[in-house]
């Protein structure tokens, strides 16, 4: 009898222990995963200092759409749109869409000259502090070693883990690693209802996506109707989870139109990312466009655009080095180095950062004109970088006649800067005034620093011109700070003055 009581007591004790342990484990899990899938929790995430300091990054649109090199990275979409110039070009060049569809570009995307280490070294020399690939564009082709699809760069095309190789090479150079993700655009990107083209063949559904009703074709300026179902939403999330687990990116960047993904899936992604980062011991950044995520839960990103005024929150803008396209095309129109530097300075003065896109060729070559511009940016930053990296906005962003037009894809509406356009940054006790051109008169007047403006806390004690070893003559008055510059320009682009008080 005593033995039975003893056994009974052990059983009761064991049951109590089993009841208690899960609660303890759940408590531990909650401590390890501070973020829950709701906006109020996600808004507690803080933008890391490394991003606030970095200011400049590089990424690249590169995939099977680089093979035709015709007009646009949207080639994979427009080639299926009747009466579109891209379709006309495609049929004349490659044949009808039932014989040669987008999938048939994949074997031609060989990346035969791709060298991740050489690319990463170029990015570093360009002055970039963060860099990475388009991990998956709207075309549905994953550029990493995915276990979720055979339509990836390891199983097809290059038969190499592009994301993985770049992640290692970029981190080897001491830069933060970025992965960008556009898959939400892929829903109805192709006419999967049309059986007269290869996109309507169910054997290729892994690339072209699920069957959608006729007329659902995605457009940038029209709402998607109907919205993706749970299966598409879950696949969108699963691929992101895989991308995170394999490569632990310091930044995940999203294209716009992410609002077609169910809100609970977007929230779950962000909770997963922030919680995984806690496990990795990393400080991470996620970006979004428009209202695709709740304000304060991630970093707002603009596309081919910038702010007209300084903001009290950090933001990002992405733009391409080519005025015409994001991917490599046969007839690019590259921006000048001067334009790229002025853009960077203006954005930084307003509490922003720049993610610059470059367009490699299908075989993995970064063309010389692109290299030249990147290296020239790097040379400029090697002299003037102290006025950019690690800085914060000043009381005002600047002065001058340049008026910035805000809005999505508005950059081509903005004029070039002139010598009277001056931008301010600050770091520690130093104030930097960056003039966006060299005045022909040899004198520069900074009117915002006039003694009657009351913006300066103390009297100016010293003025230096970065990159110049001699002394600078200057006069401080109610009218402003007048600088007498050297007879010859210091450098070919914007120049920075370091002002001590």
Image (cartoon, rainbow, N blue to C red):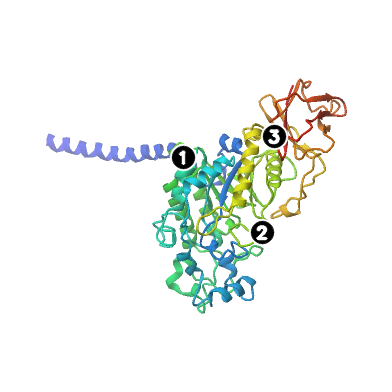
Picture quarter with the C terminus: top right
Establish if 289 lies above or below 11: below
Residue bearing the label numbered 3? 393
Q: CA distance from mark 1 to mark 2?
A: 32 Å
Mark 3 and mark 2 lie on one chain; the one further toward the N terminus is 2
Residue 425, numbered circle:
none
115 with respect to 382 (left or right): left
- Secondary structure under tag 1 reads helix
Coordinates of residue 294 in the picture (x, y in percent)? 60, 48
Which dot, 1 or 3, sits closer to the camera? 1
Q: Is residue 11 visible?
A: yes
Q: Quadrant of residue 86?
A: bottom right
- Secondary structure under tag 2 reads loop
Residue bearing the label numbered 1? 172
Q: CA distance from mark 3 to mark 2?
A: 31 Å
Q: Is residue 128 visible?
A: no
Residue 324, numbered circle:
2
Q: CA distance from mark 1 to mark 3?
A: 30 Å
Establish if 354 lies above or below 106: above
User: Residue at coordinates 47% horizontally, 55% vertically from top-left?
Assistant: 113
Which dot, 3 or 2, sits closer to the camera? 2
């Amino acid at each position: 009898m005593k033995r039975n009581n003893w056994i009974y007591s052990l059983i009761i004790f064991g049951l109590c222990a089993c009841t208690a342990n899960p609660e303890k484990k759940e408590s531990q899990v909650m401590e390890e995963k501070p973020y829950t899938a709701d906006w109020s929790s996600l808004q507690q995430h803080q933008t890391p200092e490394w991003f606030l300091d970095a200011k400049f990054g590089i990424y690249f649109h590169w995939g099977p759409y680089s093979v035709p090199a015709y007009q646009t990275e949207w080639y994979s979409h427009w080639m299926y749109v009747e009466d579109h110039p891209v379709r006309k070009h495609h049929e004349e060049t490659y044949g009808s869409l039932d014989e040669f569809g987008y999938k048939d570009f994949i074997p031609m995307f060989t990346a035969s000259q791709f060298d991740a280490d050489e690319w990463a070294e170029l990015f570093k020399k360009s002055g970039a502090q963060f860099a990475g690939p388009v991990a998956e564009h709207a075309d549905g082709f994953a550029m990493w070693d995915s276990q979720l699809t055979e339509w990836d760069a390891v199983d097809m095309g290059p038969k190499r883990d592009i994301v993985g190789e770049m992640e290692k090479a970029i981190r080897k150079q001491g830069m933060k690693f970025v992965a960008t993700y556009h898959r939400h655009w892929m829903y109805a990107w192709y006419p999967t209802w049309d059986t007269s083209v290869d996109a309507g063949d169910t054997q290729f559904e892994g690339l072209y996506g699920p069957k959608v009703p006729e007329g659902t074709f995605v457009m940038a300026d029209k709402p998607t109707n109907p919205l993706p179902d749970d299966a598409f939403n879950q696949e969108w999330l699963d691929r992101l989870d895989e991308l995170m687990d394999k490569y632990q990116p310091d930044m995940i960047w999203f294209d716009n139109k992410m609002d077609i993904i169910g809100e609970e899936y977007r929230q779950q992604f962000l909770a997963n990312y922030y919680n995984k980062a806690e496990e990795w011991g990393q400080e991470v950044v996620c970006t979004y466009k428009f209202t695709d995520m709740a304000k304060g839960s991630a970093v707002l990103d603009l596309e081919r655009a910038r702010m007209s005024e300084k903001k009290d929150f950090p933001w990002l803008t992405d733009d391409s080095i080519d005025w015409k396209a994001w991917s490599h095309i046969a007839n690019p129109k590259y921006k000048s180095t001067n334009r790229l530097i002025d853009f960077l300075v203006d954005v930084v003065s307003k509490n922003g950062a720049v993610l610059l896109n470059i367009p490699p060729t299908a075989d993995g070559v970064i063309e010389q004109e692109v290299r030249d511009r990147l290296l020239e940016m790097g040379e400029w930053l090697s002299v003037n970088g102290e006025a950019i990296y690690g800085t914060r906005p000043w009381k005002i962003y600047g002065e001058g006649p340049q008026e910035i037009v805000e809005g999505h894809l508005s950059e081509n509406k903005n004029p070039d800067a002139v010598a009277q356009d001056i931008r301010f940054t600050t770091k520690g006790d130093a104030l930097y005034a960056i003039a966006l051109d060299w005045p022909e008169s040899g004198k520069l007047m900074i009117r915002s620093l006039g003694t009657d403006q009351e913006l300066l806390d103390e009297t100016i004690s010293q003025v230096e011109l970065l990159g110049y070893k001699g002394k600078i003559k200057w006069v401080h008055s109610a009218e402003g700070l007048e600088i007498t510059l050297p007879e010859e320009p210091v450098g070919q682009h914007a120049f920075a003055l370091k002002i001590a008080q």
